[in-house]
Image: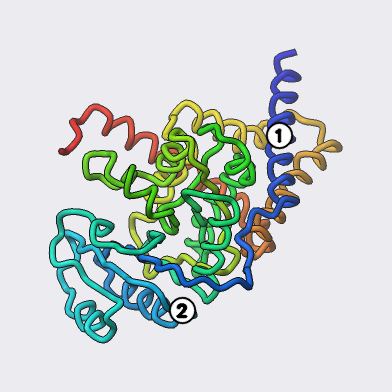
């Protein structure tokens, strides 16, 4: 009786995840390319990370944008010491400015009608800024959060990077982030956040956590708690994110990012792991093999739909699914243990 109950729970969870994926696939929550052109000033705010080469690549992409009424303010990073190239680049174009001080916030110097916060390892394409403004104006948004299309190279990256969209797109119906005012329907990424500057200046969401950079998910929730409208969409090849070089802590960072999808709730994350990874393994051991086509089919179709939504190769994601699930367990368990160990330590002020 207990075995049958467990099988029903696993199958119901698979069907629910599949239903969310189907909803996302049919609703197609992507940022569309709009033909409208605008002339509102946009302030692009970037923190200068230690990877100066990545910064230069992003700045060149911004310089080639078809949207001209922009200003770019680069916030100095405490670990980014070799800034000669950035200084030289900013000297060539008056629209680009490197802040002299590391303290304070770049948005204090911004003059645009909109603030666009970009992560360092991103590349933007023509049409992005006009599309962001159009979407924000039409739906009266305070925050438009865009999840970049991942540019993936290397086997390890393909085992790790698709995990974020895999978890996100079978966990949250993205269209409901805008349609429902409840903070429970929230999702986001720090790599591309587009704000109505007039509202942002009043609430200053980035400085709510004593100078520490808050996560996008928390900012989306905070915006909705103030009864403003927020939306999260997929980048649709208008903005890309990438890993520049091999990062020895990539597994750790992936786990931390995955854990944030669960609101850093350790219990929920463990329950998800048990059902998503342990569930199919349990079915393999105790289930009628003639009926395994149902869970296998749901997993296969989910991976294919999520791959197309994310702009990824569906064949690679299907073939690497078992390996990706191993990395899902390793990265998420590592993030959970790290959070437990750090929870007893005092926070830095």
Q: In which quarter of the image is residue 45?
A: bottom left
Up-down relation of residue 345 to residue 145 (above or below): above
Q: Quadrant of residue 312?
A: bottom right
Q: In which quarter of the image is residue 15?
A: top right
Residue at label 1? Answer: 16
Q: Residue 345, which numbered label?
A: none
Residue at label 2? Answer: 65
Quarter occupied by the N terminus: top right
Q: How far apart are marks 1 and 2 (CA)?
A: 41 Å
Question: Is residue 152 visible to the viewer in this orientation of the structure?
Answer: no
Percent across and percent down for residue 189 are 45, 51
Percent across and percent down for residue 11 are 74, 31
Label 2 crowd (10 A; few <14 / some 14-19 / many >=20) = some
Viewer-proximal residue among 281 and 189: 189
Helix, strand or loop at disc 1? helix
- Tally of marks: 2
Look at 35% across and 76% down and name the residue there: 59
Quarter occupied by the C terminus: top left
């Amino acid at each position: 009786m207990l075995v049958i109950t467990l099988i029903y729970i696993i199958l119901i969870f698979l069907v629910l995840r599949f239903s969310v994926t189907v909803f996302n696939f049919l609703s197609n929550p992507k940022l569309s390319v709009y033909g409208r052109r605008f002339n509102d000033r946009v302030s692009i705010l970037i923190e200068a990370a230690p990877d100066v080469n990545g910064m230069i690549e992003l700045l060149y992409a911004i310089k080639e944008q078809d949207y001209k009424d922009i200003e770019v303010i680069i916030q100095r990073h405490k670990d980014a010491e070799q800034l000669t190239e950035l200084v030289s680049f900013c000297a060539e174009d008056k629209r680009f400015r490197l802040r002299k001080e590391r303290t304070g916030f770049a948005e204090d110097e911004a003059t645009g009608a909109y603030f666009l916060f970009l992560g360092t390892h991103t590349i933007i394409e023509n049409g992005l800024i006009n599309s962001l403004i159009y979407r924000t104006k039409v739906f009266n948004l305070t925050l438009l959060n865009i999840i970049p299309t991942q540019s993936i190279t290397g086997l390890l990256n393909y085992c790790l990077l698709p995990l974020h969209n895999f978890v996100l797109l079978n966990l949250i119906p993205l269209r409901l982030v805008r349609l429902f005012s409840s903070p429970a329907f929230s999702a986001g990424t720090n790599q591309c956040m587009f704000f109505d500057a007039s509202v942002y200046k009043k609430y200053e969401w980035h400085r709510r956590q004593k100078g520490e950079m808050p996560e996008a998910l928390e900012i989306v929730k905070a915006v909705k708690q103030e009864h403003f409208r927020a939306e999260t969409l997929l980048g649709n090849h208008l903005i890309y994110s990438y890993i520049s070089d091999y990062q020895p802590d990539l597994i750790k960072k992936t786990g931390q990012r995955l854990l944030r999808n669960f609101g850093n709730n350790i219990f929920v994350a463990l329950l998800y792991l048990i059902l998503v990874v342990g569930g199919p393994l349990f079915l393999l051991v105790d289930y009628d093999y003639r009926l395994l086509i149902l869970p296998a089919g749901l997993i296969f179709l989910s991976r294919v739909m999520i791959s197309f939504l994310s702009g990824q190769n569906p064949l690679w994601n299907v073939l690497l699914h078992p390996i990706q699930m191993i990395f899902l367990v390793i990265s998420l368990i590592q993030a959970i243990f790290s959070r437990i160990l750090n929870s007893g330590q005092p926070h830095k002020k």
